[in-house]
């Protein structure tokens, strides 16, 4: 495709028309110039290709496809290679269905566990979300199929998601809500990004020049297109100017006409429109490699990967007395409707029409387990109690060696389109667990949910296995995990709090009317709980195994680094148990003492999953650059790692970090300080170019406050001058403030 030539030959109307969809899933064709229409489709963990009726919320039926584990599960694998493999398979499926671009992955941060769409998102941590999503994008795009990373940016709730304005400061945006997107853009080069519905500080994402032009394109070097979420367009011409290429779905010609009129009256430059069209043609052309097209794919092969992904993503939260794995010859009661009809995916635009679904009951039968009994325990909707079903479940539990209860959040509790209001499971399920545990101490709870839940029964259940929304093969994965054919190796990609009231955004979620205040700032997820030294149900990164591991011999390649240096950290991990297993080694960085008042206690900056046989050990290495130690300093503006001694910690969760080493950072960069009469003396001493020029004034102050005499309090003086503006000096001394300002500049 000769893009430059096509643009020269296109009419104004054709250019404007290319900037919006032809219908719900297709772009417009320009047949006379050989520009074809292309098709996009949801979803992040499976194809939702709709051939007849089209909709945005998974209401109409789509083609039969493979449902892989949802993002909440895949992120818990902490396995870049695995999620990359899932991406590759999805790309293969998209090719077979003639899909040009897959709408995913969804990488918005889990600001609150109540967000109804958290099941689709990856993590509360931007580093983990970015690393995992970059591998996914590389996998999909290796098959000559595009991705549309979503939702850019700060789309962290469903309540009024199409209109709400997020009130959030730049540092918080940069460190928490933009970092995952930045990593994906720089590491994986996605073909497209999808802008979110919401406003950021009063400006809709679709027309946010700072977000799309300044940050995404100029700073990060993004060279793909930006499309809207479905219906996320506000002012069409302003969006073009801000760098938004494609409006989806069709505007039925209304916004096309606005573009034509704006060019004709001079309010929109033709160069702006041509640039958008050039990006669109380049994007379309990327997916036109006929040699990359296939007519079919092996659904059963893909189903097997879905099963392995579910196994790798499952998190063993608790295993008192080594109850798991179970003995195949024991009599075991399966209790709960989800054993028969598992909840394996979320509701809304990512809902897949799965070509098959494995339940735990069917998988148990197929694997030859003969002593399994079953009791539904609660009604089919997952939320309604039944005294008769409860009594039957208790009878089955008493008569068995072990009870396995399959519970979780039903579709009515979490979905795209609305937020949760509680962390609780349905009361009938909590009651079932409590009463089964009372009659059967050997009780395993298997969870199916898209986000954190409370567990009032946690001390009574012997074992808890978190499956999240494990995809269509979840039942087979559960049987393999429960009976030891597979060893759990997932780690929590989010913190499980004890109470809703403990969560970071509790007082600011979901906001009031059209505004939500991100008052917790950078303290999201474990950053919040660690800063407050708060007890949690299960910490970020937590996950057990059927074997044991030991970490030792943490080494840093150097004890100090400067601006251009890269630091290597290595650690030995050993399987000290009796069965093969996988451990995820996690590396966190803590700031120097003088920065701890405004920075998180620690932040994840590296992870690696390692497979080990019994007695085997391996060395794991991490590469850390200056950015690994930095925070976003708006006064520069940019990423800044100030001088000081930082701590590198390694372990197996955010709260299990047995190994520590120190590294000193020396930075040539300094935070600029503009001296005015309101500048504080403390800031002059910290950031001023020549702070020693202030010494004569400080000496006068020491004498005036009696600090040269016995019993003086230097800490009182230090804190007083730290916040004292220059203009206040005139209140105590006959100082020429204007002269002092000029001297300090």
Image (spheres, rainbow, N blue to C red):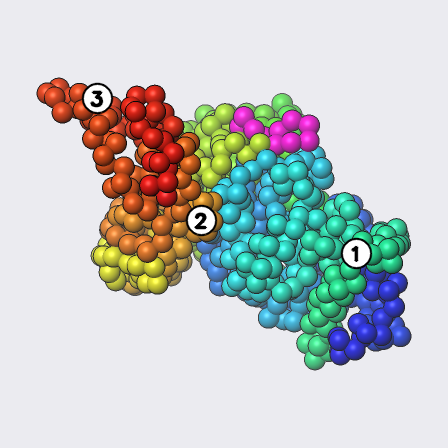
Q: Secondary structure at mark 3?
A: helix
| In-front residue for pair 624/432 | 624
Q: Residue at x 28, y 58 (%)?
A: 561
Q: Residue at x 37, y 56 (%)?
A: 626
Q: Secondary structure at mark 2?
A: loop
Q: Which numbered circle lies on residue 704? A: 3
| N-terminal-most mark, 3 or 2 | 2
Q: Which numbered circle lies on residue 636? A: 2
In front: mark 1 or mark 3?
Answer: 3
Q: Which residue is mark 1?
A: 268
| In-front residue for pair 202/418 | 202
Q: Position of residue 704 (x, y in %)?
A: 21, 21
- Evaluate whether residue 63 shows in this view: no
What stretch of residues is rendered in magenta?
Answer: 506-516
| N-terminal-most mark, 1 or 3 | 1
Q: Is residue 618 magenta?
A: no
642 over 245 or under it: above or below: above
């Amino acid at each position: 495709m000769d893009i430059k030539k096509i643009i020269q030959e296109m009419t104004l109307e054709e250019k404007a028309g290319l900037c919006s969809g032809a219908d719900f899933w297709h772009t417009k064709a320009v047949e006379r110039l050989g520009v074809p229409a292309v098709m996009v489709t949801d979803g992040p963990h499976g194809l939702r290709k709709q051939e007849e009726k089209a909709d945005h919320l998974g209401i109409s039926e789509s083609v039969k496809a493979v449902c892989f584990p949802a993002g909440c599960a895949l992120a818990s694998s902490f396995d870049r290679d695995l999620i990359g493999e899932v991406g590759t398979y999805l790309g293969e499926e998209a090719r077979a269905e003639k899909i040009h671009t897959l709408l995913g992955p969804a990488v918005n941060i889990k600001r609150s566990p109540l967000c109804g769409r958290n099941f689709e998102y990856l993590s509360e941590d931007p580093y983990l979300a970015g690393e995992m999503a970059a591998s996914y994008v590389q996998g999909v795009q290796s098959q000559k199929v595009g991705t549309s990373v979503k939702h850019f940016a700060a789309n962290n709730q469903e309540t009024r998601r199409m209109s709400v304005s997020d009130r959030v400061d730049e540092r918080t945006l940069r460190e928490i809500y933009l970092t995952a997107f930045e990593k994906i853009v720089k590491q994986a080069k996605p073909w497209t990004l999808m802008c979110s519905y919401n406003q950021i500080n009063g400006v809709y994402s679709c027309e946010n020049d700072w977000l799309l032009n300044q940050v995404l394109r100029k700073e990060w070097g993004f060279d793909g297109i930006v499309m809207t979420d479905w219906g996320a367009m506000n002012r069409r011409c302003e969006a073009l100017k801000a760098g938004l290429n494609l409006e989806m779905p069709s505007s039925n010609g209304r916004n096309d006409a606005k573009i034509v009129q704006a060019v004709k009256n001079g309010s929109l430059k033709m160069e702006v429109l041509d640039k958008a069209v050039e990006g669109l043609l380049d994007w379309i052309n990327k997916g036109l490699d006929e040699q990359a097209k296939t007519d079919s794919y092996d659904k059963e092969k893909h189903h097997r990967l879905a099963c392995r992904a579910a196994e790798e993503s499952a998190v063993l939260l608790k295993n008192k007395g080594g109850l798991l794995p179970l003995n195949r010859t024991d009599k075991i009661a399966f209790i709960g409707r989800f054993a028969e009809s598992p909840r394996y995916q979320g509701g809304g635009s990512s809902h897949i029409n799965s070509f098959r679904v494995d339940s735990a009951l069917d998988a148990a039968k197929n694997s030859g387990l003969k002593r399994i009994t079953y009791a539904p325990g609660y009604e089919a909707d997952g939320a309604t109690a039944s005294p008769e079903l409860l009594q039957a479940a208790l009878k089955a539990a008493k008569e068995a060696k072990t009870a396995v209860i399959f519970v979780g959040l039903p579709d009515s509790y979490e979905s795209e389109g609305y937020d949760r209001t509680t962390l609780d499971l349905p009361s009938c399920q909590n009651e079932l667990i409590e009463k089964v545990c009372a009659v059967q101490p050997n009780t395993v709870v298997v969870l199916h949910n898209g986000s954190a839940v409370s567990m009032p029964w946690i001390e009574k259940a012997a074992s808890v296995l978190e499956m999240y929304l494990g995809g269509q093969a979840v039942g087979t994965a559960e049987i393999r995990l429960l009976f030891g054919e597979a060893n759990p190796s997932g780690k929590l990609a989010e913190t499980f709090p004890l109470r809703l009231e403990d969560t970071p955004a509790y007082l600011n979620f979901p906001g009031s009317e059209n505004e939500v205040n991100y008052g917790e700032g950078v303290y999201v997820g474990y950053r919040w709980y660690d800063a407050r030294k708060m007890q949690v149900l299960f910490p970020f990164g937590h996950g057990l195994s059927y074997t044991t591991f030991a970490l030792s011999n943490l080494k840093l390649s150097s004890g100090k680094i400067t601006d251009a240096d890269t630091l290597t950290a290595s650690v030995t991990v050993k399987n000290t148990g009796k069965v093969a297993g996988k451990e995820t080694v996690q590396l966190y960085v803590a700031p120097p003492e003088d920065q701890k008042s405004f920075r998180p206690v620690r932040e994840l900056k590296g992870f690696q999953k390692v497979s080990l046989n019994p007695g085997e050990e391996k060395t794991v290495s991490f590469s850390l650059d200056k950015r690994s130690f930095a925070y976003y300093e708006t006064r520069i503006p940019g990423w800044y790692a100030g001088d000081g001694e930082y701590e590198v910690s390694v372990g197996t969760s955010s709260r299990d970090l047995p190994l520590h080493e120190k590294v000193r950072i020396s930075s040539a960069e300094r935070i600029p300080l503009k001296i005015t009469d309101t500048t504080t003396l403390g800031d002059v001493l910290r950031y001023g170019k020549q702070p020693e020029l202030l010494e004569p004034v400080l000496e006068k102050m020491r004498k005036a406050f009696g600090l040269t005499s016995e019993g003086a309090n230097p800490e009182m003086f230090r804190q007083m001058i730290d916040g004292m503006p220059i203009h206040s000096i005139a209140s105590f001394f006959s100082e020429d403030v204007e002269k002092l300002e000029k001297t300090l500049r």
